[in-house]
Image: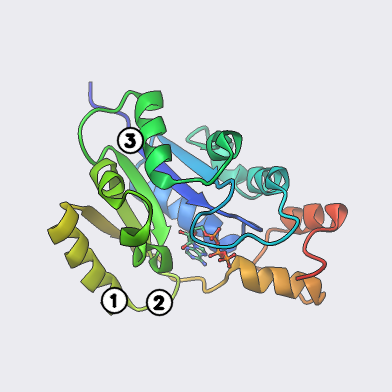
Amino acid sequence: MSEKRIGLYGGTFSPPHMGHVRAAEAFLSRFRLDMLYIMPAYVPPHKAISNGDIPAHRLNMARIAFRSLTDGGHAVVSELEISRQGKSYTADTLAELYGLCGIKGRHGIYMLTGDDMFTTLDTWRRPEEIFDRAHIVYVSRGGSEELCLLKRAEYEARFGAVVDRLDIEPLPVSSTELRRAIAEGRDTAGLLLPEVLEYIEKEGLYREG
Ligand code: ATP
């Protein structure tokens, strides 16, 4: 029997928005994943986390935002990185998922990133392990496709990387913009799921931007 098709989609998700949800939905269906692990990070190593960040809130918001996927039984919002605590390194997460899912061989996990993260992958902790275990799938969020193609060729030559592009219409929205919009009381319709906004308001999150 062939191995199951496992996916990984990591991020800060502070808050999770429609750009994340649309990308994850397309990733799940186009790559015919049996199980997608949506993975909120504990402390992202590549960016300073805002004061007062509470991982449990990000986890709860991710559970709300990605419900359309998890209800289908082919996706789960995982606590793996948040429970591990400390800095969340993707190389560690891939190794853990390999064990958990009994994956053998190279490029055994489809890993989704936005184009911005894709172009920085070689600066992450232990990139050779990431490229060894992950089959990288990047999705445009409106960045330079030319730069992505250059980085793709570099990763293939340097690490023997396997890379694909998820072709969807970009939704140029970021959590940073949304935190600002919420703090300023601006409309977030179409960019944030109403249920996520409700949670944010109930818990009083992002009042300071
Ligand atoms: P921030 O503004 O706080 O940096 P973000 O919007 O980039 O947050 P993250 O949680 O850091 O969100 O992103 C998780 C993953 O989702 C990353 O790989 C990122 O590139 C990707 N991503 C973020 N926004 C989009 C979007 N609008 N479309 C496609 N992918 C996205």
Q: Are the residues flagged by discs 3 and 1 in contact, CB closer than 8 Å?
A: no
Q: Secondary structure at mark 2?
A: loop
Name the amino acid type tagged 1.
Leu
Name the quadrant containing residue 52: bottom right
Q: Which mark is residue 104?
A: none
- Can you give x and y, in whole percent of width and height, for residue 18 in the image? 59, 61
- Can you give x and y, in whole percent of width and height, for residue 13 in the image? 60, 55
Dot 2 crowding, Cα within 10 Å, few <14, some 14–19, many 20+: some
Looking at the picture, tell me which residue is in the foreground, 31 or 152. 152
Q: In which quadrant is the C terminus drawn?
A: bottom right
Q: Which mark is residue 143?
A: 2
- Can you give x and y, in whole percent of width and height, for residue 59 in the image? 66, 44
Q: Which residue is located at x 47 percent, y 35 percent?
A: 74
- Can you give x and y, in whole percent of width and height, for residue 163 in the image? 24, 56
Name the amino acid type tagged 3.
Arg
Residue furthest to the top in view is 1
- Along the horizontal axis of the image, is 159 left or right of 177? left
